[in-house]
Amino acid sequence: MNERVEIILSGSGGQGMILAGIILADAAIREGKSVVQSQSYGPEARGGASRAEVIIGGEELDYPKISNPDILLAMSQQASDKFLHRVKKGGLVILDSSYVADFPRPDGVRLYSIPISDTARDGLGKEMMANMVALGALIQVSGVIGRDNVQKAVEERVPSGSLEKNILALELGRKLAKNSDIL
C-alpha cells in the first residue's frame, strides 16, 4: 500500500479511542508501513470529546494532519456530528448505533451502523471493551491492517489480566462487522 490512509477514531473520553488509535498505529508499524498517530482530549477526563488520528502510508508521510479522512469511527453523536461530513467520497464510516442515532447518509461513502457499545456490554459484560470491539469491526470492513498484527499490538498494549477479554472483543467486533450490511 503506497496510498495514504487517514483515519479518525472519535468518541467521548473514557471510551478508549486513544488506546485504539495507538494499537492501530502499532499494528501498521509491524506491517512495515509509515505511520503518524496523534490524539486530542476535551477538557474533561471522562465524557468530553476524545479523538485519535492515524495516518498510514507505504512511503514517508510528509504531512501529519488529517483534512478529509478515508475512515471515520464515531462512537458518540458528537463525534458523528463533527466529522461525518468530512469523510471523502469512497470513504468508510463506522458508527456506534448504541450512541449515534441521528446521522445523514452521505453519497459515495460506505456506512455501517453497528451496536458496538451494546455488544461490548451484553457480549462481554463490560462496555469499556467497546474500543476493542470497534477496532475489530474497523479492521474487518476496512482491511487497512491485518488481524494478526492488530492482535500482536493488543498483546503488547493491554494489561495481561485483561488480554483474553480484549482478544475476544476484537473477534466479536470482526464477527459483528462481517454480519452487518452497508447502509
Image: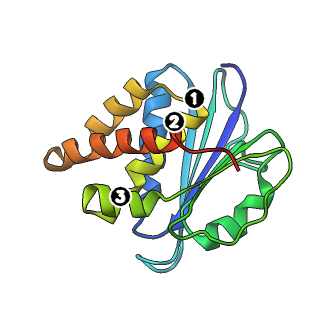
The answer to which of 31 and 108 lies nearer the viewer is: 108
At x 35% / y 58%, what residue is drawn?
A: 120
The answer to which of 104 and 67 lies nearer the viewer is: 104
Please tell me in which quadrant of the rendered image residue 81 appears. Answer: bottom right
Q: Which amino acid does label 1 sit on?
A: Gly
Q: Which of marks 3 and 1 is in front?
A: 3
At x 16% / y 44%, what residue is drawn?
A: 160
Separation of disc 3 and disc 1 at Cα?
22 Å
Q: What element carries label 3?
A: helix
* Label 2 packing within 10 angstroms: few (<14), some (14-19), many (20+): some
The answer to which of 7 and 174 lies nearer the viewer is: 174
Q: Identify the disc placed on residue 120.
A: 3
Instruction: Determine whether 62 is above or below 129 in the image.
Output: above
Separation of disc 2 and disc 1 at Cα?
5 Å
Question: Whole-percent x and y of residue 75?
Answer: 54, 63
Question: Whole-percent x and y of residue 73?
Answer: 59, 53
Separation of disc 2 and disc 3 at Cα?
17 Å
Please tell me in which quadrant of the rendered image residue 60 appears. Answer: top right
* Residue identified by numbered label 2: 139
Q: Nearer the viewer, mark 2 or mark 3?
A: 3
The answer to which of 156 and 136 lies nearer the viewer is: 136
Q: What element carries label 1?
A: loop
